[in-house]
Image: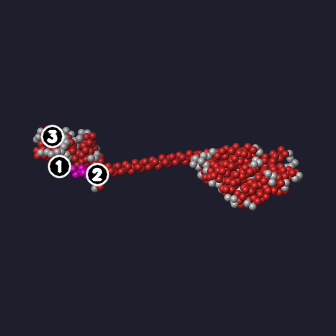
Amino acid sequence: MIGRNIEKTNNVESACAEKEKTKLLTPTFRILLVDVLLAITLSASAARLVNISPYISFSAEKLVDRGDRFLKSNQPDSALVCFILAGRKAESNRANTDTYAKAMLGQWRIFFFYYYDYAKAYSALSAADTAQGASPKVKAAVYSAFGNMYQTFYSYSSDTQLGRKATNYYRLSIRSQVESHTHDTETLASTFVNLADMCFWLHNANSALPYLRLVVKQGGSNEPSIRFCRLLCKALAALENGRTDEAVAALRLQEGDLPRLDNNRFALVHYQNLALAYEQKGDKQQAIACYDELKRCADANGGRDAVLLAYEGLMRLYEQAGNHGEARVFRDRYYCLRDSIMNVRAMMSINNIHFLAEIKKAEDTLNRMEERHDRMVTILAAAIILILAVSIFVVVLWRKNRILHDRNNSLYQRYQQTLRPSVKPQTGREADAHDEELMEKIKNAMLADVGIFESGYSIDRLAASVGEKTRTVSETINRVYGDNFYALLNSYRIREACRRINAGGNTSRLTIEGIAHSVGFKSRTSFLNYFKRNTGITPSEYIRIRTGENEKQ
């Protein structure tokens, strides 16, 4: 929760009115009473609180816009919250340089014009100035702010070095606006008005003329703000050279354009210079009327510096006119307002404890939200990558299994066609009639003798069955079959294993090792090798395919 919107000059006016009612009191006690009244005013404004939690989720651009709205409605504390949060968000995103600079400019306005904390104001403005990559329009606003700040310091101290710094920054701002074509005419004219005013107080009004030509060329001579600038230059040059009638005439011509100008700065400069011209001319009544109008315009917009200038002028004019009572009234108001401006920073420090604590809490909350957001983004990205990887893996695996399944089915079907009572040679070469005859005997003997499914069955036993020598049987098998005796024997055993698997029965309850031993294989490895060699698939795949076919049937 944030509180405390600083009251405008009319609150200090009320305090000053109370002060005038205490003329019988000592001056020290009267000043103390005014300070107490000011503290009460500030404490009362502290009761108005604003919930900052909704603004934490806003974007930096939206926060800057909301801060500007708060400033227009005279809620500087709420505006400061928005500008601080906007600065934090924009600083973390270096692509958002303009928004960061605008946020720091907003902080500068509040610290400088509302809190009178010039150290923090200068720090914020320096941060805006050092923002790399800011647009020319934003840089021009920063230069103008520096000029405004140094002009204010000059008005307090009359230090010409500060005045020169102000004019240099105003010149930079005008050049930046003109060269980049990013200005609007009234903003450009307002910057020039400040430059011309500053040149006059440094007794060198004509030094603003080159920049007047730039402004006229860029904005057009028919614009109300441009006519105002031309007349101002003419009036200040005449005033500097003692030609007061010419100065008054030029300044009076400005009044026709004032209603068409949105910036209140034009009216303040007009009445200030017109009052000074009448004062130099010796027309005290007209000068007093102009200072009264200056005070009215400043009161309407919270311009304490202009009110202070009006009080000083009225105090001086009434004193010169011999009206010491009115002079004393405006002297009291002048010192009351000046003291309030000088003491407001100390007064505000009491109410700032809760305010700054809330700002710190808001920044901590923002940091935690950013950290949580970063973690969630990281987790989400990792989850998406993992899901994609698993999905791709599943698809690839499914396709491979599908291809393998189709291939195994094809091999199974082809092998089923080879399961016949007789066995034809897989490979071989040309054989004579004797070899063919002997090979036919060998095949018949192996088909008729179930002993081939015993692990001890040998080529000697086969040779005895066909009535030939062992060597003759072996050579015939090699020539006709194209492989050795054990390859031929194991091919019969594999065919028998497949037949038994197809038939089901007890074989369906056997393990791979059990099936291998039942057809004469001594080891699982040998059975697997010969099964894959003869069928193209493993026993497990063969059993799975056969089981699937049985279920379909």
Disc 1 packing (10 Å; few <14; some 14–19; many ≥20): few
Q: Nearer the viewer, mark 2 or mark 3?
A: 3
Return the residue nearer the eye: 452 or 409: 409
Residue at x 74%, y 59% (from the top left corner): 258
Residue at x 22%, y 47% (from the top left corner): 495
Span colored in magenta? 407-422
| C-alpha gap between disc 3 and disc 1 | 20 Å
Residue at x 12%, y 39% (from the top left corner): 469
Q: Residue 215, position in %: x, y?
A: 68, 54
**Quick check: marks 2 and 1 in contact, CB under 8 Å?**
no
Give the mark nearest the N terminus, 3 or 1.
Answer: 1
Disc 3 packing (10 Å; few <14; some 14–19; many ≥20): some
Residue type beneath disc 2? Asn
Compared across the picture, whether 1 is left or right of 289 comes to: left
**Residue 515 in magenta stretch:** no
Return the residue nearer the eye: 479 or 274: 274
The reply to whether residue 3 is visible in this rendering is no
Mark 3 highlights which residue?
Answer: 475
| C-alpha gap between disc 2 and disc 1 | 24 Å
Q: Residue 103, position in %: x, y?
A: 64, 49
Mark linked to residue 80: none
Residue type beneath disc 1? Ser
Mark linked to residue 409: 2
Indicate the secondary structure of the residue bearing disc 3: helix
Compared across the picture, whether 112 is left or right of 511 comes to: right
Return the residue nearer the eye: 97 or 41: 97
Q: Nearer the viewer, mark 3 or mark 1?
A: 3
Indicate the secondary structure of the residue bearing disc 2: helix
Mark linked to residue 422: 1
